[in-house]
Amino acid sequence: MDTVTPKKELAYIQSLFFLFGFMIMSWIPRFPEVKANLGLTNGQFGSLLSTSAIGSLISLLTVGHLVHNYGAKTIMRIAASSIAVSLILLTTTHSGFIFLISSVIQGGAISAFHIAINTQGFSYQDRTKKPVITLLSGFWSSGSVATAMISGLLVGHVSLNIHITVLAIAALLTMLTIITKMNSVLIKPNKNPSDAYKVSDLFKGFRIDTLVSSVLLCGLCLEFSVSDWAAIFTKEDMGIKGGLHTLPYILFTLAMITGRLFVHKLFNRFSMQRLVSSGALISGISFLIGLALVHVVNPSNKNLILLVLCISFTFAGLGSSFLAPSIMNVANVRSKSPASVVIGQMGVINNIAIFFMRLIIAWTAQVTSLSFALIIPAAMLLLVPFFAKIFKSV
């Protein structure tokens, strides 16, 4: 067996982050087709999507402890397989009930893989003393934008079920191969009985970091809202047809990649507190300006509307790009628990909050309009500077 050097290990981790984003985000640009398959309204579709938080919550409560006690390899294999199977079901079914069950499974599997791969990333960072967490998030975003571009090209040419089925199987097989090659450096099961985490520890050792949870929700809200609604907003509300309706989302994600890959160059020049505050304000304000301007432009001028959205989404993505990984990093610094447990516990409260935020946004869109509903996540970014004091310790 070949020796896995630190350089090779980083390349493997980067590949897994890329494929993780590539697979789970592949169906998002085709949400209008998924919604049409189910015959649902915006409120109903948004409510079904939010059920993924149930599975995610279960994973966040348990998987961190499972990774610590049993190692990363088995968790990553099961999670990747579950993501692929549930993704195929989500994009082929016409049944709301099957969609709901698949959504719960996918939410749990995504959180499980998220915990395992990020724990491996923190392990690499601790061993090599290289700050790679934000960089790794950039590779996740690279995968998501690559799959969005492919989806945009395939709309109207390749059916949704064929596209997602082939993609999910190919991505899964590649991920399983990489996981096997990484075996010697993957986090091993805990062998010290005194350090083992028991079922009772799920609640006994549970700690809520209010400041971290609050800033994470405010910083993430726009990112998941753009993922959920960008394609539907540009196609159905703005009337942008064909593959072009995915362009604002693609540019949003490209901007996130750029920010995550290059923000480390600013670490020596500006404090993390200043960077986070400035990024959140740039993101929130640019998104709000874009939402306002598209309603001033003549509705028949689709090219100008698309241009406004592209510029707005690009600045919004750039400003918010490094918020989530930076918050995850500071949460790990502030806690004495293992990284896998920190990631899980931090996500529990946040996923409960995101579940309700998704419902609020979905039904606000149903009662008013999607344009009005998207003001909510943009406005939440403007609150981030009030919590940025947590970065003083980083």
Image (cartoon, rainbow, N blue to C red):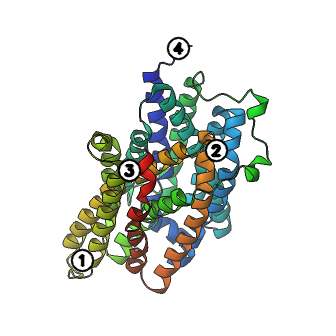
Tag 3, which secondary structure? loop
Badge 1 amino acid: Leu
Q: Which mark is residue 322?
A: 3
Q: Secondary structure at mark 2?
A: helix
Disc 2 designates what residue? 341
Residue under label 4: 2
Whether residue 309 is visible, yes or no, is yes
Contact, mark 3 vs mark 1 (Cβ under 8 Å): no
**From the viewer's perspective, is residue 15 above or below residue 300?**
above
> Which one is earlier in the sequence, the residue at label 2 or at label 3?
3
Query: Between tags 4 and 3, which lies in front?
Result: 3
Q: Between tags 1 and 2, which lies in front?
A: 2
Q: Quadrant of residue 74?
A: top right
What count of labels does the image hold?
4
Callout 3 amino acid? Phe
Q: Earlier in the sequence, mark 4 or mark 2?
A: 4
